[in-house]
Image (cartoon, rainbow, N blue to C red):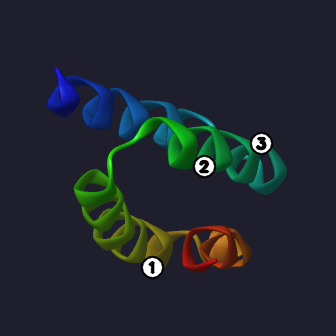
Amino acid sequence: MSKVMFEYTKSVLERVSFDPILFCKELEKAIKALLPYEMELLKEWLLDFIIEKPELKQCLLIVNN
């Protein structure tokens, strides 16, 4: 079940990546929903994903807090 939630979270974040504010809001929701080990996977995914979308770098602050 948790793998499904992680994949769903990535899917949502990819779909809203056109808007940094919306992306940050969805990321905040994901942080509340995911398990600790899933958060580590999400951090790794975010670092790779943000390379192509530098306007989303500000959202990394949410994850690192």
Residue at left 60%, top 75%? 60
Whether residue 27 sits left or right of residue 12 in the image: it is right
Tell me the amino acid under the disc marked 1: Ile
Q: Which callout, 1 or 2, points at the residue further toward the start of the chain? A: 2
Residue at left 72%, top 53%? 24
Spatial separation of the CA atoms under disc 3 and disc 1: 18 Å
Mark 1 sits on what residue?
A: 51
Looking at the rendering, in which quadrant would you find the C terminus? bottom right
Whether residue 34 sits left or right of residue 30 in the image: it is left
Whether residue 48 sits left or right of residue 53 in the image: it is left
Instruction: Give the percent coordinates (x, y) of residue 49.
Output: 40, 66
Q: Are marks 3 and 1 in contact (CB under 8 Å)?
A: no
Question: In the image, which disc is placed on residue 27?
Answer: 2
Mark 3 sits on what residue?
A: 22
Q: Nearer the viewer, residue 54 or 43?
A: 43
Position of residue 40 relative to residue 25, above or below, is below
